[in-house]
Image (cartoon, rainbow, N blue to C red):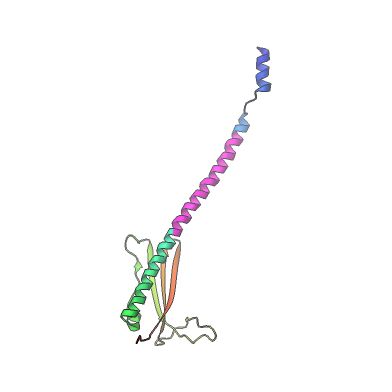
Amino acid sequence: MKSLSKRCRVGFRGFTLIEILLTVAVVGVGLIGVLYAYTAATRNAVSAERAVVASFLAREKMEEIIADRSLLGYGAVLSKEYSDGRLPSPFSAFTRSVRIIEVDPDADIGSDSFLDPLPGSGYARVTVEVGYGDGSVKLETLIADYEVP
């Protein structure tokens, strides 16, 4: 019996408590890293989805303004109120604002940025901004007062 017990101690060593605790700690740290990466990926996917929806909502309003320019004329676009504020369900997490400012196309020498306001110029800078929780999407275009023959 003595030789069997000695053989078990020397030849067939098992895991010690310290080895098991170290293994659990290493696996635990690895799991925490994987869970953190999964959470971050999920959060980024939701943010990307909101950005896509916000860009669609901004484009929708921009298309409405461009259509009004074609159908109703330049003056109608300047006088109409387009801002929505908070959007109705299912887009209640989004806000939409519209700014239409007549600008001077020749105010900047060498580079026409269309940033300087000038009422009656015949050029208007249209800015549509859709905001959501942690970001926003902004679209800008320029419309002009012209007659189609």
Query: In the image, which residues are magenta?
Result: 21-48
Please give the name of the residue rendered at 46% of the width and 63% of the height, measured from the top-left corner: 135
Q: Is residue 31 above or below residue 75?
A: above
Q: Position of residue 69 (x, y in %)?
A: 35, 79
Position of 76 with respect to 13 (left or right) is left
| Quarter of the rendering containing residue 68 | bottom left
**Image quadrant where one finds the C terminus:** bottom left
Q: Position of residue 26 (x, y in %)?
A: 59, 39
Is residue 15 or residue 56 the one in the foreground? 56
Q: Residue pushed farthest top? A: 1
Please give the name of the residue rendered at 50% of the width and 49% of the height, measured from the top-left corner: 38
Please give the name of the residue rendered at 38% of the width and 66% of the height, measured from the top-left corner: 95
Per the picture, the main secondary structure of the magenta-coloured stretch is helix
Please give the name of the residue rendered at 42% of the width and 66% of the height, measured from the top-left corner: 55
Q: Is residue 140 above or below residue 87?
A: below
| Quarter of the rendering containing residue 8 | top right
Position of 71 with respect to 12 (left or right) is left
